[in-house]
Amino acid sequence: MKHTLLKLEPLIWLLFGQGIMIGTMLLTAWVLVVGLAVPLGIVPADALSFERAHMLGSNIIGRVVLLGLIVLPMWKGVHHMRHLFIDFGTGRDELIAPLLYLVALAGSLLGLIAVIRL
Amino acid sequence: MSPSTPGRTRTAPPRLPDKFPFEGRYRAYTLFDATGILYLMLGLLVLGSVWALGSGEAAWNHVQATYRSATYVIFHLIAIVAVVFVGVRFFSFFPKAQPPRIGPAKPPPEPVLLGMLYVAWIGVAGVLSIILAGGIF
């Protein structure tokens, strides 16, 4: 498993790095508007009515943005969590790392299905 | 005579630095890693939202109603602080991590690169926010 993870390291680092860079850029807007402004009534709820949200999310650009919002933060998240476990001396990296990456992989595949079925 | 196989190099056992995890410069380091938990949760929340959007109006409205609860609002307040922290910290050391050359090209000077990153961040987040809030389209 350690050998496999080392071979996959460039791909994991690519997703991790883009999770920080692009994930942060996209999440800033998502959290501000979807997580805060609409729930707090700063932005009218109509902005995210089902018809409008579906119109925005179901075109090709919308699907790519939504996929980025799902996949990239997950990979950033699990890679940093792996390092938290290493830094705090759990000593179980050979077990924790594959588990965390499997979570991100499963989430990414579900994300792909989610944007396809829009 | 030399031994047939080299002996194992003796090293001191690894030891955590005294100030780890929450003192001095280790505080920001540990918090930066800990934002991973929030990013994973945010990714899963977006996944749930998109899944609901694909499931129909009732599911989408349910998600919107859930987001109005105090728990989710507080979570998103913490999340926006974490996201801005990640952006500021990462963009501050991104220019320092560039190689001196990439093929024939040299990366721009650090202040220029940092400015470009902030322009991209504000631009992408700004345009997407305006679209989501109903300002465009």
Image (cartoon, rainbow, N blue to C red):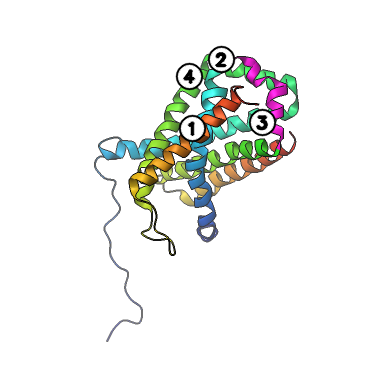
Q: Which residues are magenta?
A: A39-59
Rendered location of residue B27, percent (x, y)? 31, 36
Counting residues from the start of the chain, the first of labels 3 and 1 encountered is 1
Q: Can you identify the residue that label 4 sits on? A: B74
Q: CA distance from mark 2 to mark 4?
A: 9 Å
Q: Chain of mark 4?
A: B
Residue in view at x 57 percent, y 35 percent:
B43
Instruction: Inspect the image, locate mark 2, and give the three-letter code of the amino acid beneath it.
Output: Ser
Comparing B110 with A32, the one in front is B110
Rendered location of residue A76, percent (x, y)? 50, 42
Q: Can you identify the residue that label 2 sits on? A: B69
Instruction: Inspect the image, locate mark 1, and give the three-letter code of the amino acid beneath it.
Output: Leu
What type of secondary structure mainly makes up the magenta span? Answer: helix
Counting residues from the start of the chain, the first of labels 4 and 1 encountered is 1
B109 w.r.t. B1: above or below: above
Q: Can you identify the residue that label 3 sits on? A: B50
Comparing A30 with B35, the one in front is A30
Residue in view at x 38 percent, y 52 percent:
B108
Asked whether residue B21 is in view, the answer is: no
Viewer-nearest of labels 3 and 2?
Answer: 3
The disc placed on residue B38 is 1
